Image (cartoon, rainbow, N blue to C red):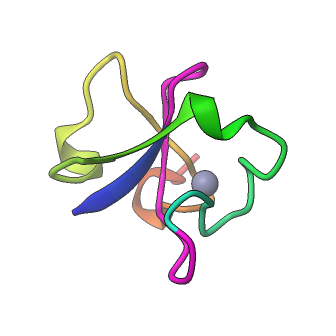
Amino acid sequence: MRVVLNESTKTIHKPARSNGQSTACGALRHVSPARIRETTRTGPDAATDDDTYCGRCFDAVSGY
Ligand SMILES: [Zn+2]
């Protein structure tokens, strides 16, 4: 699936439907576009230590 990666914090967000540079939760509104990269991930189940999935974008990983 398509995701949006904040390269400075290694946090993965869901892309907003209308604009690939922003996220569904709006967390990256104040982050420089130079630090935001569109990429692909299998999903939260495939998260590695380097990847933090945004709890607001991915309800599946917000179980705490
Ligand atoms: Zn998010």
Frontmost residue, 17 versus 41: 17
Left or right: where 49 falls relative to 52: left
Frontmost residue, 63 versus 49: 49
Left or right: where 31 falls relative to 51: right
Q: Eyeballing the image, is 36 above or below 55? A: above
Magenta residues?
A: 6-19
Q: Residue furthest front?
A: 34
Residue under the image location 54 percent in, 53 percent down: 62
Residue under the image location 55 percent in, 73 percent down: 16
Residue 61: x %, y % from top left? 44, 51
Q: Main secondary structure of the magenta part?
A: loop
Number of residue marks? 0
Q: Residue furthest right?
A: 30
Residue under the image location 84 percent in, 43 percent down: 30
Q: Would residue 45 be counted in the magenta stretch? A: no
Give the position of the N terminus as an image quadrant.
bottom left
Residue under the image location 51 percent in, 53 percent down: 63
Q: Eyeballing the image, is 39 above or below 26? A: above
Residue 7: x %, y % from top left? 51, 25
Task: Identify the image quadrant of residue 57.
Answer: bottom right
